[in-house]
Amino acid sequence: MTNRFPPKGRTRDDVLDELEAQKVNDVDWRGGRIGLYTHFGGDDVLEIAKDASRMYFSENALGPSAFPSLARFETDVIAWTLGLLNADDDASGSMTSGGTESIMMAVKTARDWSRDNRPVSGIPQVVAPYSAHPAFNKAAHYLGLEVKRVPVGPDYRANVDRMADAIDDRTIMLVGSAPQFAHGVIDPISDLAQLAQQNDLWLHVDACVGGFIAPFARALGRPVPPFDFSVPGVSSMSADLHKYGFTAKGASTFLLSDQAHRIYQVFEFDDWSRGHYSSPTIPGTRPGGPIAAAWAVLNYLGWDGYVRIAGELFDAIDRLKEGISEIDGLSIVGDPPLTILSYTSEDYDIFAVAEAMTRRGWFITRSADPRAIHMGMLTLIHVPVVDQYLSDLRDSVEDAKTGTVEITDKAITYGG
């Protein structure tokens, strides 16, 4: 086998120059040409996140006794997030590397809780709306569970009656989203929580997108239905810091309504030479940078900073919604109250519109059900480009109406 390892070291400038050169084909996220994968709360916010992360680049949160500063930062961030989401004083939580890990911790915790509190025969089952994030299936695949996905209602929200019908003697967990990713709508969490309580089931609310934007939307007087720990029956939640918290990537939260359930979250082991091992999350080593960056950004912005950003963002989103709805043949999918929206058409092929927008330099993502253009998660980077987007969209619709746009990209993959 040929050894492909670099034979000699290179200069710092040479390495950095090549890194910069390799960006040539990357999407122009700073130009607002993409609606997902990046989240921007301003250059000042980005810089403090970078600075804090750099200060704790080498520290490891696996060792809180060695790095008590990181333990303090995590404790603060979790306490602030629990307060933001209306948890009681006996709630608990941990920082994770992202929404997928937070969801995996939810499934793992619910599975282990059920073993003690409502054991089932056979493979435990999670009942989720069809719109729930694929991370629930990913977690179930890893952890030996099954997910039963239930069709959503005509408003794209979880159909509580159909979820109730799907519950059987193997069900241990229900799922709701605030909001769900495909259409940006918030599931009826209060009804799901009541269903969970009636059947002694664990309810997880996936607020990975909404956790750090919905409270500030509500503070601005925008209508946000109940979705958090203020709803009796919500067992756990996930909320991503690196989305609308605008912190460094690799930061989310997994939150428990009752600290007593933490024993089902933590992995403990002592049958080896070193002694006792304890980990509250999937990784052992946890980089200190994202934890420090989260603490720094939340302190830097504070409540007033997040409300300010939310105000600017929702002004732009309202303009987008109005502009899209005014274009002949286009309609917003559902009634999304937050920062995700998608739109479709019954008059012409929406994927032809997507193709035409791509040719105009936008990174366009597509949804499958219904066929739609998905605008991802809008942030401050999109505020200055609303008018240009709408102008290009009007021209792209005219192209699509001709029926001559050749669709070369039919991909609807998220994550590929």
Image (cartoon, rainbow, N blue to C red):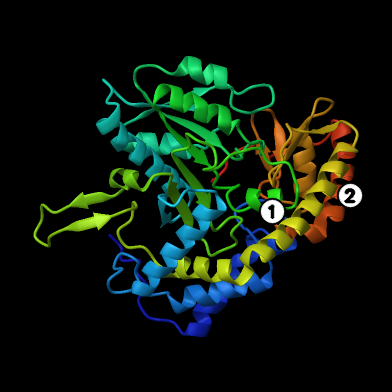
Quarter-of-image position of residue 62: bottom left
- Looking at the picture, which amino acid does disc 1 mark? Ile
- Looking at the picture, which amino acid does disc 2 mark? Ser
Q: Label 2, on which residue? A: 391
Quadrant of the snapshot with the N terminus: bottom left
- Where does residue 101 sit, x and y in percent of width and height? 42, 48
Is residue 19 visible in this depiction of the protein?
no
Quarter-of-image position of residue 367: top right
Q: Judge by depth and name the residue closer to the eye, 193 or 98.
A: 193
Q: Label 1, on which residue? A: 34
User: Which residue, as the protein is rendered here, is positioned at the far front?
Assistant: 89
- Where does residue 330 sit, x and y in percent of width and height? 84, 33
Give the side of residue 57 with respect to residue 331, left or right: left
Of mark 1 and mark 2, the one earlier in the sequence is: 1
Q: Judge by depth and name the residue closer to the eye, 326 or 116.
A: 116
- Where does residue 100 sit, x and y in percent of width and height? 46, 46
- Is 124 rendered above or below residue 395? above
Q: Residue at x 48, y 62 (%)?
A: 77
Q: Residue at x 43, y 75 (%)?
A: 56
Q: Categorize mark 2 by other alpha carbons within 10 Å: few (<14), some (14-19), many (20+).
A: few
Tell me the element at label 2. helix
